[in-house]
Structures are given as C-alpha cells and as structure tokens.
Image (cartoon, rainbow, N blue to C red):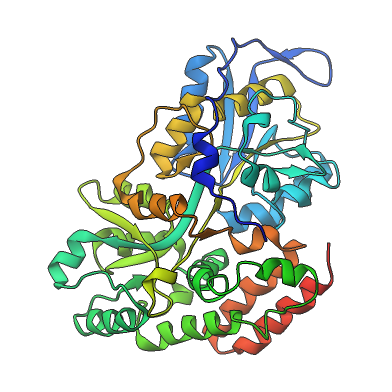
Amino acid sequence: MRTTKLTALVAALTAGTVLAACSGGTNASGSTSKTLTIASVDQGSVEDVVDAFKKANPGVEVRLTTSSADQYQQQIRTKLSSGTAPDVMSVWPGNGNPGATYVLAEPGYLLDLSDRPWARKLPDAVKTVAQYEDKTYNAVFGLNGIGAVYNQDALDRSGLTPPGTWTELLDFCRDAAAKKTPAFALGNQDNWVTQTVLYALAATTVYGPDRDFDKKMQDGRATFAKSAWATALAKYEEMEKTGCFQKSPLSTSYEASQELAASGKTLGIVQGNWIVSLLKGKNPQGRFTLKALPATDDPGGFLMPAAAGMGYGVNAKAKNKELALKFVDFVMSPDGMSLFAEKQGSLPTLAGTGHTADPALTELSTFINEDRTVPFMDQLWPNPKVQQTMLSGLQELFSGQADADDVLKGMDTDYRAGT
C-alpha cells in the first residue's frame, strides 16, 4: 500500500470546473427532456446540492430518491442490469462494496468521465480509487476520516475528558457507564456501521507498525487471521465488554445512534466526519469534535482512517446523459464541493473552493497534514465480498453466533478468491 499525503496533493491543485449553462438533454427517443433522475445515500446534504443545481439551471426538474447505504447497495446492480437505474447515482471509491467504482465500471454500467475538466485535477490518491483501468468513473467530491466524535456539552456535564490512550479509553468507558451515560453510541442494526470502530482501531494496530500491510496481503504474504487485525478485533470486543457502548447495539439503528449522541444520552459516537453535520442538524446548539480513537498507549503512533469519500457516477445508459454530466460537473465545481463539504463536514477534493473547514475537523486535518492516515481498508480489497463477510460476521459476533477467528478466516477466504 502506498499512502499519499492528501492535503499536500489537494493544495497543489487548481480550482474545479464552472457549470455551463443548461440546455435540455436528449433521451433514447430523440426528444428533449429537462428531467434528471438521481439516487443517493447522501441524505441530509444532497438535497441542498440538488436545489443549488436547479437554481443554476432554471426549468430543470430533478427526481431525487435517497435511501440507506445497505438498501441502496442491495438494489443498485439489479436496477442497472434491468435498465431501471437513474441517470446519476452514488458510487463508492475503490472495490469495497456492491456500489463501488470497480464493481460497477467493470461490467460497463458507468459512463467514462475521463474527459470532464475536473477529472485530470484529482489528487493521485483519489484517482486510484475513482478510476478503473485508468479511466475515471467517479466524481469524488470530498475527503473523509473516521474517529471518535464527542459531544462537548455531554462531556462537560459528566466531568470527563476525551481519552488520549487505550488504557484511558477503557477507564473513560467505565467512568461513563458509572454515570449512566455510555461513552459511545453504536448503531449495529445497520450492518455497515459495524465496521467504523474496527477501522478506527485497525488504522493504528495494523498499519501503525506496518504501512505495507495491504501490499503483503496482495502478494499473499499476510492474512487477516494471523495479523494485527486479530488484535484490532479483540480490542473492539473488549470495548463492548467494558461497556463502551449503549445496551443492545444490534437493535439500535444508525439513525437512533445519531439521536443518542446528539442529545447527550451518550458522550459521543465512533463514526466518519460526515456525522458531525447530522448531529448538528439534530442539536443545532451542540458542540462536536472528532478525534482519533486511541488503540494503543502510544499517542505518537496513532493513525486515522482517511480517504476519498463517496462520489457520483453516471449511468452508461442514462436517459438524460447531458443533464447527468452537468450535475456531476456541478458536484465537482467550487460551489458544489463547498456546499457538500459544508453540509457533510468533509474536506473538498480540489483546492480553490473557498471552503473553510469545520473546526470539529481540526485533528483530522492535522493527521492528514502529518501523513498519519491510511485509506479506508475495504477500498483496496480485491472484491466486495470481503467487506460483506466482515459486516455480517461482526453482527454475528455481537449476537454471539460467531467468534473473531471465524470472522477473520471468512474474510481471508473471500480475499483469496480475488476479483
């Protein structure tokens, strides 16, 4: 694995594209249309971007549908293969899930966006996961990170402070539980949520001592089961047994976990930076800060997962290809990226947007600047089955139906199956 210093690359780039004037697209029958269809999992942020796009393009109608990541990933390939998919859709970077760039581009479901003005300006670290066979298919507009997001008002009421080491983290969890306010909300009913704590721990435990771990996996010189992934998973289990989470994470949805953290019923939540804006939406007066989740007693060795966030692709058989391209160009324009960054609490992929990062992301920005980040782990796995096995395995782990070794061995089996 080659880790790239994202901020330095982003700072070296020029501004994104400017949206051209709108004109009607042409559908399969040759008639013009001003209706664009979009499917997105960016609930709470894409709506404002769509409104801004419509304002910039008078007369355009947008039919937007939003859904959870789990629901979306279950349906998108079926819709693409049956010809019922929308013009524009959410696409994840890399190869980690059924809605990821490699998975959708390989069978020809996505339109090649390599000729768009913004495509050549993407940082190298982003191009790696936005391209398939050297062609760009994903308009990745933001950079994201995963860590512990704390509710400062809840901390003040508890008299506790964010932990700085692994030992302090366990003490923090015990003290929080004693005060009847669990440390972290965990919404494992939505299976994608199960990975966030594990990724936050694996960044330090796996990649801290071995930045080349992914390369060793690719070469067959390492496995999940016989590596520090076992350490990371053991720490995840220890957090659960220590009482770091609220009761019954498996019966708590992602939405419900947001409510717990936003209202101060927990002291925080381990999630991506995108959740900061969602928490503020539920508690406008709240103060939230993202910090690295301690995984060892050596803070100088902490790493954070940070990588290209989800973007948008264009259906290769889009009914309104012209408007679809206009929309992804708008997403990648200074206005579009700034609006997404503001609503999601992320960092724009390209420089020159004029966006001022949320102060809650100060530590994430510092880690990026200091080259103390690793990509989201699944983005470099050879197929989406590895992640799906991990997610279902983690739910089984929390329900007592599997143990850690079962989960990791299952991941190894799917990893060795290749693409």
Residue 42: % across, % down: 51, 44
Residue placed at 55% from the left, 25% from the top?
16
Q: Left or right of 158: which side holds 239?
A: right
Residue 42 visible? The answer is no
Q: Quadrant of residue 184?
A: bottom left
Q: Is residue 224 above or below residue 72?
A: below
Q: Is residue 125 above or below residue 27?
A: below
Residue placed at 80% from the left, 70% from the top?
219
Quarter of the rendering occupied by the N terminus? bottom right
Q: Left or right of 291: which side holds 195?
A: right
Residue placed at 24% from the left, 79% from the top?
176
Of residues 335 and 166, the one drawn nearer to the viewer in this rendering: 166
Residue placed at 85% from the left, 41% from the top?
108
Quarter of the rendering occupied by the C terminus? bottom right
Q: Quadrant of residue 74?
A: bottom right
Of residues 60 and 244, the one drawn nearer to the viewer in this rendering: 244
Residue 399: % across, % down: 54, 85
